[in-house]
Image: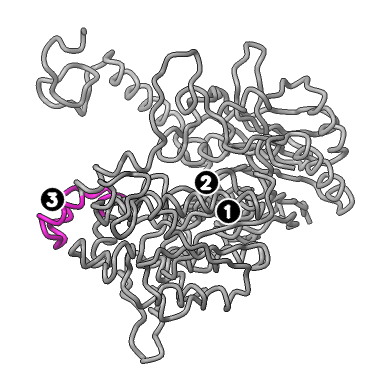
Amino acid sequence: METRRIILAQLGPHLGALEENLARHVEVLGEARDTGADLVVFPELGLTGYQLQDLAGEVAMRLDDPRLARLVAATGDLSAVVSFVEESADHRLFIAAALLEDGEIRQVHRKLHLPTYGLFDERRFFASGDVLRAIPSRLGVGLGIAICEDFWHLSVAQMLALDGAQVLVNVSSSPGRDLAATNEGGLGTATSWRTLMRAYAQLTTSFVVFVNRVGVDESISFWGGSEVIGPAGDTVFSAPLYDEGVFICEVNLADVRRERIALPLLRDERLELQHRELGRIIAERAGLAPDSMVEEGAEGGLDVTGQPGRGAT
Amino acid sequence: MNRPVPAVPLGADGAPLFELPVELAIDTDVARRVIAAFIRGQLRQAGFERAVLGLSGGIDSALVAYLVAEAIGAERLRCVLMPYRTSSPASRADAEVVVASLGCVSEVVEISSMVDGFFGSGDVPGAAGPEGLAASALRRGNFAARMRMAVLYDRSVTWGGLVVGTGNKTESLIGYTTLFGDSACAFNPIGDLYKSQVRQLAAVIGVPERIIRKAPSADLWPGQTDEGEAGFSYPHLDRLLFWRIDKRRSVEEVVAMGFDTALVARVDRMVAAAEFKRQVPPIAKLGPRTAGIDYLYPRRRPGSARS
């Protein structure tokens, strides 16, 4: 059996209380070591809370921060994904999720997609990451780490799987909203996320590990509902909505092999086609190639007719 | 996956307790969980363990009293009944039923002398001078709402609890609130619920049927009702607001859904005209960092809690 034990730390961090949240992480890591866990996943900004605004710069940590080193030390011989505000050497602030293994920071994923619409204002306070990489892990398979909104962009899950990830990890601080009675679980947000995770797991024939926080920051309540979805889109584990808790589940990595041989979607991806057509679309948008979707009379790069010369102003 | 819409609870006479437009039906279990955690979170962040609110006898404040009691226990809630001399005795009786059923601390603070002290009473002018004797019911009503606010904020100190807001989304959107009066609070658990949703939640949490059924009123003068004054029913108004605001439908789209063109225009005007009541007053931007503009912190920062 290629069984791995995964712990979903569905915590409710306290806003801006870095030391307190750090202590809770260390405590959970200790419990995880005792239960023989292989991987522990904490939610997005689990070390700082989400609605930071101008506090972001005050709770930011560089990767050589001794507080981070304490967490690395507490990880011991398991794998952990923790999330915090990372400050780069050139003082940009990122929403980061780090893979901790073997007493070191193995990878830092910087959130790629920063929602700045509706109730979100992330782009105001944070820089967006530019790198997406799967990474080998102690689990024996590749991991792909993404943060919340990253999963609302189709390409992210696909690229991680194509890059070698068999377990896609998404850490989130997803605010619950749309309480319509007709929604699954009474919450529109939960319905949308559950749909996404099953689709990604099935389409990438990978495990999807989703860890979402609970608790309240200001007006916003986070809904939990952390899940593990199998490579056939099957539900392996569902944590309750809104309850804080540390949940243990087991996955059988052989399921990935079985599914990928039975349903070779990744094998059949047409990367060169995507690459070529994306190159064309980029050139067309930049006005460097004739726009195949353009209205008659429009300038290059514009799908709609513009006034001649307006693009120059 | 869609679930069926829950049925509206029936009253003692077998008739539905209220009208619930299908698109406004919420999952009341989830709402109660979110609101309870919200109330506890607000208190914890501020370093308080208690709450205080003004109980009018109407459904909004009754519902909030039940929600606070559910979140932190009735023994930590103080309800203040603040009648004016023309307030309806039935409202007071309904408020007392809520207090008795919850078993929370309560007190009655008559605000007549505070209001009359300003406007005067009978032929005797108050602090406002002779002109005050002729003050309109609206002026008096607004003043009374602000006196109630002042009492609650005093009790916030003596009771050691945060003032909980009791205004709903419908009245906030159309501006049926008194600025720095009933809208003043430390936090509001029901400010994102339409009146129809307040009724739905009130019915499941145990607010007495009499309170759920009676016509909503600001109780500014005897016999006043919101719907009588405004000329529309809450379920109809709630639906219109939901489609216009939450679902971003255009005027043309809601008219095509069957809403009256004149009503849509009137409600749109009310919502726009009340924008100032829903926002923090603007500060003239002069310095390098200005609150609300480029000085943006959570309301409760680490280390700021009362200890």
Q: Main secondary structure of the magenta part?
A: helix
Could you say which disc has been placed on residue B38 in the image?
1
Q: Position of residue A140 (x, y in %)?
A: 76, 41
Q: Secondary structure at mark 2?
A: loop
Identify the residue position indicated by label 3 in the image.
Answer: B252
Q: Is residue B301 left or right of residue B164?
A: right
Q: Foreground: B299 or B223?
A: B223
How many numbered callouts? 3
What residue appears at the point 25 percent right and 46 percent down from the top-left corner? Answer: B131
**Do the residues at pointers 2 and 1 share their chain?**
no
Residue type at numbered disc 2: Ser
Q: Residues within 10 Å of mark 1 (few under 14, many from 20)?
A: many
Return the residue found at the far front.
B124
- Does residue A271 belong to the magenta stretch? no
- Does residue B256 belong to the magenta stretch? yes
Q: Residues within 10 Å of mark 2 (few under 14, many from 20)?
A: few
Q: Secondary structure at mark 3?
A: helix
Q: Are marks 2 and 1 in contact (CB under 8 Å)?
A: yes
**Do the residues at pointers 3 and 1 share their chain?**
yes
Q: Position of residue A70 (x, y in %)?
A: 85, 31
Give the answer, above or below, for where B6 lies relative to B154.
below
Residue type at numbered disc 1: Phe
Label whose residue precedes the other's in the sequence (3 or 1): 1
Quarter occupied by the C terminus of chain B = top right
Q: Is residue A236 visible?
A: no
What residue appears at the point 61 percent right and 57 percent down from the top-left corner? Answer: B51
Could you say which disc has been placed on residue A219 in the image?
2
Q: Position of residue B56 (x, y in %)?
A: 44, 66
Q: What segment is highlighted magenta in the picture?
A: B243-267
